[in-house]
Structure formats: structure tokens, C-alpha cells
Image (tube, helix red, strand yellow):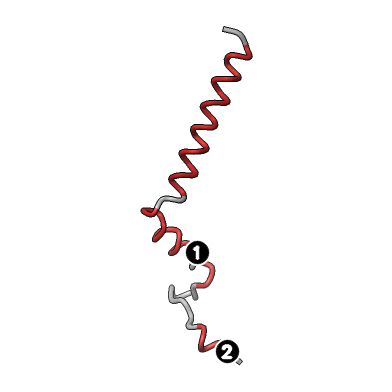
Amino acid sequence: MDSPVYQGIMLIAMMVAFIGLWAWAWSHKRKAAFREASLLPLEEDNGEIPDQAEHKD
């Protein structure tokens, strides 16, 4: 086997890995975990998320 054959095999393997990771990230089973992670920057030090109504001027 030559180098181009190995490169072709690695290309296919990387494409399969990318598509698998993409499918895992966009699966409905992960939606709740990603929603929770998206709120982490908004948490106060005590772990609570402030109400938006409290911060309106």
C-alpha cells in the first residue's frame, strides 16, 4: 500500500468521525445537557440564574 492509499483511508476515517460527532452533538438526547451548559455563564455564585425581570430598568 502506498502513501495515497493511507491518505485516502485517513480521509474517510476523519469524515466518518466528523459526521459521527456532528450527529452526536445535534441529537435530541443531548439537547437538555447543552441547554443546561448554555446557562452556566449566567449563574450567580450561589448557583441560581437571576430573573430577567429583576434587571430591567
User: Measured along the vertical axis of the image, is residue 16 above or below residue 42?
Assistant: above
How crowded is the residue under tag 2: few (<14 C-alpha within 10 Å), some, or many (20+)?
few
- Residue type at tag 2: Lys
Question: Considering the numbered disc 2 on the image, is that residue within a helix, a strand or a loop?
Answer: loop
User: Measured along the vertical axis of the image, is residue 3 above or below residue 28?
Assistant: above
Left/right placement of residue 5 relative to residue 22 reads right
Question: Considering the numbered disc 1 on the image, is that residue within a helix, a strand or a loop?
Answer: helix
Estimate the x, y position of residue 44 in percent, counting from the top left.
Answer: 49, 75
Estimate the x, y position of residue 9 in percent, counting from the top left.
Answer: 54, 20
Estimate the x, y position of residue 18 in percent, counting from the top left.
Answer: 52, 37
User: Measured along the vertical axis of the image, is residue 14 above or below residue 20?
Assistant: above
Q: Which mark is residue 20?
A: none
Q: Residue at x 49, y 68 (%)?
A: 39
Extreme-top residue of the structure: 1
Which residue lies under the disc numbered 2? 56
Give the mark, 1 or 2, whose residue is nearer the N terminus: 1
- Residue type at tag 1: Ser
Which residue lies under the disc numbered 1? 38
| Residue 28 falls in image quadrant | bottom left
Q: Residue at x 61, y 8 (%)?
A: 2
| Residue 31 falls in image quadrant | bottom left
Q: Residue at x 41, y 50 (%)?
A: 27
Estimate the x, y position of residue 56 in percent, counting from the top left.
Answer: 58, 89
* Front-most of residues 26 and 36: 26
How crowded is the residue under tag 1: few (<14 C-alpha within 10 Å), some, or many (20+)?
few
